[in-house]
Image (cartoon, helix red, strand yellow):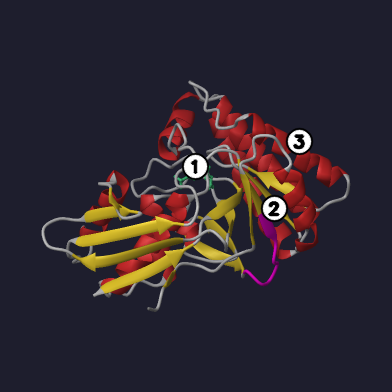
Amino acid sequence: MATTACAHPNIALIKYWGKSARPGNYPAAPSLSITLDALLTTTEVRNCEEADRIFFDDVEVPDAKVLACLADLRDVYAIPYLEVHTSNNFPTAAGLASSASGFAALIAAINAHCDLGLDPHAQSDRARRASGSAARSVFGGFVALDGPNWVARQVLDAEAWPLKTVIAVTTSEKKSVASSEGMQLSEATSPYYSAWVTSTATDFKSALAMVEARDFDALAALAEFSCLKMHGLMLSTNPGLLYWNPATIACLHAIRELRQQGIPVFFTVDAGPQVKAVCLPEAENDVQSTLQSIAGVERVLTTGLGQGARIVVP
Ligand code: PMV
């Protein structure tokens, strides 16, 4: 008997970069994200005999983070050895938040397979322990992750404000420094780290109000500010974390130019070189054709807002 779940990646409009000292992988500051419909992770779990076995696209990979997630669950729940099969319909570990959808789908699958009885908030807590951003992929639409409990919650559902996201893939190679490692390095070495943590809490509160008011222009300015501030923090880490390539920067300029022409779009970039352009539905075609024409953009993916993690009924 196998159980299959799926989940979508999310992208943060108010970014998460930095952990609190408390065990349990708690973020140092709140974040706000949108869940993306067209990108999908599908994960199947089934019991197996002697040890956990992890497969990505049918290739066995003893992924340390997945094995640690299973061990962490076993500290609390009686879970048999599991065989886990995961696949993504998009590039893995290249700044498209595959760990977010991956762990949200894994927890949803194990929860159903082993009858753990976890509600979505409890699933979000378990997902966060494996990857901070995964806590948010448990929910669809606009999602907040903040204290005191640091489990995610939905702020608006996917239909309530149906934004589009055009993703410019500038390389399909894996990223050089994993986010957890990068966050620790930023905290240890950047002179800007504490200002980042304090100011992100303020940005988060403002962004919540903007989402509730559907104020696109205000959210555009604040989301770009949060993104560039996070990359400023990354650049001020020692050694500097430089995730961008020339095509990334060309996309940022092009998106700013579109906005100056009155097209409702803004950018955000995570720990990788891909650019996500978030826009109102009427701007989708202009944004797509602009990003497609930029040298170094390998391909463009367009998506609406998606649902949270869920079981796939065979
Ligand atoms: O959840 P992690 O450890 O993969 O970190 C995610 C960090 C960013 O994607 C850069 C920002 C975010 O809030 O998603």
Q: Can residue 116 be seen here?
A: no
Q: 220 or 146, which is in the foreground?
A: 220
Tell me how far mark 3 sits from mark 1, CA to CA: 21 Å
Q: Residues within 10 Å of mark 2 (few under 14, many from 20)?
A: many
Residue 272 at x, y percent in the picture: 54, 38
Q: What's drawn in magenta, residue-wise?
A: 158-165
Q: Can residue 208 be seen here?
A: yes
Q: 312 or 115, which is in the foreground?
A: 312
**Circle 1 — which element?**
loop
Location of mark 2 (residue): 278
Q: Earlier in the sequence, mark 1 or mark 2?
A: 1
Residue at the limit of the structure toward the bottom, as seen here: 313
How many badges with numbers are in the image? 3
Quarter of the image for residue 21 reads top left
Location of mark 1 (residue): 94
Residue at the limit of the structure toward the left, as seen here: 50
The kind of residue on which mark 3 rests is: His
Tell me the tag on residue 253.
3
The kind of residue on which mark 1 rests is: Ala
The kind of residue on which mark 2 rests is: Val
Q: Please indicate whether residue 153 sits to the left or right of residue 204 in the image.
A: left
Q: 92 or 196, which is in the foreground?
A: 92
- The residue shown at (25%, 46%) is 62
**Circle 2 — which element?**
strand
